[in-house]
Image (spheres, rainbow, N blue to C red):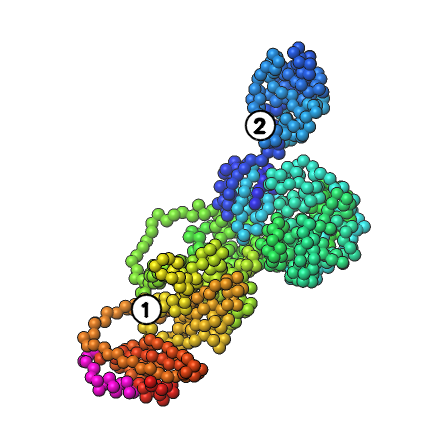
Amino acid sequence: MKISYNWLKRYINIDIKPAELATILTSIGLEVGGIEDYESVKGCMKGLIIGEIKTKTRHPNADKLSLTTVDIGQPDLLHIVCGAPNVEAGQRVIVATVGTTLYKGEESMVLKETRIRGEISQGMICAEDEIGFGTSHAGIIVLPSDVPVGISAKDYFKVENDVVFEIEITPNRIDAASHIGVARDLAAFLKTQYTKPGIDNFKVDDQSNMIPVIVENNEACPRYSGITISGVEIKESPEWLKNRLKAIRLNPINNVVDSTNFILHETGQPLHAFDADKIKGKTVVVKTLSEDTAFVTLDGIERKLSAQDLMICHTEGGMCMAGVYGGLHSGVSESTKNIFLESACFNPKFIRRTSKKHGLSTDASFRFERGTDPEITVYALKRAAMLIRETAGGKISSEIADAYPQPVGWFNVELNYANTDKLIGKKIERETIKNILRSLEIHIEKETENGLSVSVPPYRVDVRREADVIEEILRIYGYNNIEIPTKVTSSLSFSSKPDHDKMVNMISDYLSANGFSEIICNSLTKSEYYELLTSYKKDNLVYIMNPLSSDLNCMRQTLLAGGLESVLFNINRKNRNLKLYEFGNCYRLNSSQGKNPLDKYSEAQHLALFITGSKSELNWTEKETPATFYQIKAFVENIFKRLGFNLDKFEKQITGNDVYNDILTEGFSYRINNHELAFVGSVDKKLLKSFDIEQEVFYADIFWTEVFALLKPDRVKFSEIPKYPDVRRDLALFLDKHISFDEIKNLAFRTEKKLLKKVNLFDVYEGHNLGDDKKSYAVSFILQDENKTLTDKQIDAIMASLMSAFEKELGAKIR
């Protein structure tokens, strides 16, 4: 956003060097990214002086040249050779003195004293194109005879010389996206006053062109104000207005459009002018139109509207995409005589949705998307109407139509002095705090010994909590005014074990060492991802009060969406073989809420793994093999092992029965004591298709907060190497197809709790010869007594017990 220094001085009386002012702006949260000079005429006419031609004689050596003597207010006359056909003695002219730089387009020339056909020339009598004031070269510029000799051309032509600040405004500070907004902040910091232009001279001339306003969607348009101005003349704007707009890099268009742009950058309130004679039915209607309604915008492109696009309409159709872009057939043109001027407050969500859908971004949508002041619409409308009447003539031909059914109230905040001191790190005088709040137009409703009750104006969309008010106090008080402590008191403390950060770093190192790349995705996401999911319901989303865009309007419930975006990003750049991981927090609005307000929300850390493509790049030593479910499963189980968990204690539950079945096509979850710690599987193909991913992706979600809570300080224990050998026995089990290996393993450990150490599945066979509903498992059992060598009799007894259990409880046949 560009702020003109000359323009800014209209509202606040300051005389500060630009570099110093840039430092002040940055210190109060309006970071200056650059400073540049602006000149309404290139070179600012430096070295150009008004002179009078005293004598003119013919050049002795050239028929088309003249010898002149020129008075520029100095003791000696200048001798100048001039070739213009209209040069005469007695004329007031513009003289470029020796050493002046003249600009013609992109070219420049430094004027030197020289001889032309043997005669000395000590300057130049200038034409329009030679000083950048026009394009004509037919002759020299002749000024009125009463123009004083010796004054600078810059002063005579009122050439604008300005300094422009490029302010990198943050999304939450839309209140400062105007010259008045910046002046307000500066006045608070400098402990002075700023002045808003008055509107006392506003008056309605007559009511000959009343155009009523109907707002059908008050959610999308909380306030809509309008007025008509009749009998205007569309023409070029005056120089002062053009210079103001040019300084901030806006191209002047005509006096009406320029006036609305001027008020936008003065107040921060977008305006739009319609040709009143093109408003059919003489009524303005604010509403949405049917899906796929065709609408031609100002750029001549026909666009298909969404049923959620807010439109400004007449009785027969759309005129303008509200707050975003005008229509081709309703705007101001050279033939316009009567205008309807709009000043409104729109819901940021509707404007943002329309802007993003149609790929349109304007100065108006930039402000409406972030939230404008509903209380300024009428003020800005009156300012604009007065300016248009000044620059385009005409008369104000209606009362202000103001649809404002539910006025937006000020936001009440309780400010505690103790919290203020704690967050700032310094006790600020209470009177100073109150003065800062008043200077920021935050009203003090009540004061107690412990704090203040304040009300915040609606235009401060970012100040809603106590911490926000404290930040405002500190911003104006000055971060640099908070002293660095001269003495720091510290003490040794014992940190609890296990250390969370060390555990995260340990697992990150393990994954990175095994070829994974860490990703960090935005914790803000779009709610559309959750519309079709049942595992993560849209009702549990935590929405942002003032989102930057519809793509960042809520907090994520899962790391899956961000990970799939990263997968797609890499695939589109021909990086198809991926192993990614992310540690990140997920957020949820709880359906059941306790008495504590904080119970309304929950926040938990997760670890997500993604594997897709091939296990390794194609090379001459091995064939390219695709990644598999068992690859990511192995990494998950190794993470649990690295954290000290005994995998034999885990229960595995196959996904399905509405458990992650909208996310995974196959997979299972890990549980301990019916407490879920992770799930792993292959991402559902429909979900992948919605992200335009065509290759298979394997995904694991480890509930890190839950896992960390189960870790113990002594998670790694020393165990002596057994003195006595273990014994392995194998069984082939003929089973029903629905029986899982976990059921076999759990039953085995329940049957033999003391000597059975491990159960492993090493072969699975399915075939028509067994039957469609049968399968064969080859399972190994490791037996060991840590105190003595097992005898054959003991081993046979254990195996007999296991076989009996499998036959009775699982219906297995031993083969």
Residue 697, label in figure: none
Q: Which residues are magenta?
A: 786-801
The picture places residue 25, in percent across and down from the top left corner, at 51, 43
State the SS at label 2. strand
Most distant residue in the top direction: 60
Task: Confirm whether residue 310 shows in the render.
Answer: no
Q: Which residue is mark 2?
A: 108
Give the residue type at disc 2.
Ser
User: At 36% across and 57% down in the image, what residue appears?
Assistant: 620
Q: Earlier in the sequence, mark 2 or mark 1?
A: 2
Q: Work out whether residue 20 or residue 59 is closer to the camera in this orientation and state it.
A: 59
Locate residue 698 relative to residue 265 in the image: left or right: left
The picture places residue 658, in percent across and down from the top left corner, at 50, 75
User: Does 787 lie within the magenta span?
Assistant: yes
Give the residue type at disc 1.
Lys
User: At 67% across and 27% down in the image, what residue appears?
Assistant: 128
